[in-house]
Image (tube, rainbow, N blue to C red):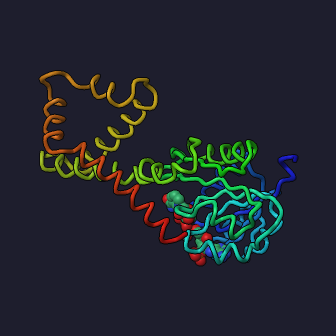
Amino acid sequence: MDRKSIQVGFLGCGEMGSMLLEAALQDGILTVENTRVAERNPARRDSLKSLGIDVAESPDRLGGCDRIILAVRPQQFEAAAAEVGCSNSPRLAISIMAGIGSHAIRRSLGEQTRVVSCMPNAPVKIHLGVTALMPSENSTEDDLDFAQSLFNTIGTTEVLPESALWAVTAVSGSGPGYVALVAEAMLQEAIELGLDPSVAERLIARTIAGTGQLLTEHAGGPEALRQAVTTPGGTTEAGINRMREMKLVDAIRGGLKAAHDRGESLAGETQ
Ligand SMILES: NC(=O)c1ccc[n+]([C@@H]2O[C@H](COP(=O)([O-])OP(=O)(O)OC[C@H]3O[C@@H](n4cnc5c(N)ncnc54)[C@H](OP(=O)(O)O)[C@@H]3O)[C@@H](O)[C@H]2O)c1
């Protein structure tokens, strides 16, 4: 099918949906002509209309779309999907909803629905995020290509099996929270050591951003980077040794495991 004739609908267009829509329009992945939105918040509808987008209040406007981006909150999905309607025709659903699996989506939108589940993380807001794309067994190469081009407008993408959902959520989905906690602890001690709080905040933010960039650009992974920046007998080594004695590594690994297990139990409650 010609990309221009494919109708794409957004079911809900709040913080995440509108950010994704605007980036995709800007990069030419979507056009105002082939996109429509169902959004019940009047203020959001007005701002989308100002972009020239076809916006309606009711999800039943999305019934004829070939591709639907599911961007409502998980607890809003069932009611919103009932208004879109269940269909026997094949169509693609791209879901950014945390914790709603492809089976639940097919149950609501129709068994022929092909699903790509997506887990973006907070830095997508500044187009520096990473989004895990998890196609269901019936989705096609073309579905995945479209999802990749969409989410590449707000960062990078990784393709994973659906079974990786809770591992990915624990690593990159919740990851910005852990890094912020490390930054908080560094800030508390930086102030204790006499640094001006605003200077310390900038030092820490640039240290984390720069280290992330080093990890991205250099082969070898985190262990090689740690070794490269640690002089035997020096300050970094003294700091790391104390952190190890205080079980920092165990604490971080335990935190990721707890996030993973919490995801699994939340999914059990909503499926
Ligand atoms: N924000 C993040 O950092 C982030 C990260 C990863 C994944 N996600 C996922 O992204 C999804 C959206 O999150 P968000 O932060 O963008 O939420 P949001 O700002 O609340 O956006 C959802 C929008 O959908 C509207 N809506 C709900 N039910 C509707 C219906 N039946 N018909 C029409 N519109 C409807 C909501 O209107 P009302 O305001 O009236 O309810 C709201 O404007 C969630 O499932 C979340 O799990 C978010």
Toward the viewer: 163 or 99? Answer: 163
Residue 123: x and y in percent read: 48, 49
Left or right: residue 46 versus residue 219 is: right
**Quarter holding residue 19:** bottom right
Residue 197: x and y in percent read: 22, 51
The residue sitting at 78% across, 58% down in the picture is: 91
Residue 161: x and y in percent read: 58, 46
Q: How many marks?
A: 0
Q: Is residue 122 above or below residue 207?
A: below
The residue sitting at 74% across, 46% down in the picture is: 140
Mark yes or no: residue 19 visible: yes
The residue sitting at 19% across, 22% down in the picture is: 231
Left or right: residue 185 versus residue 157 is: left
The residue sitting at 17% across, 41% down in the picture is: 243
**Quadrant occupied by the C terminus:** bottom right
Toward the viewer: 162 or 127? Answer: 162
Mark yes or no: residue 15 visible: no
**Quarter holding residue 48:** bottom right
Residue 29: x and y in percent read: 73, 47
Q: Is residue 212 above or below residue 114?
A: above
For ligand 1, give the image quadrant: bottom right
**Quarter holding residue 86:** bottom right
Left or right: residue 4 versus residue 120 is: right
Toward the viewer: 140 or 57? Answer: 140
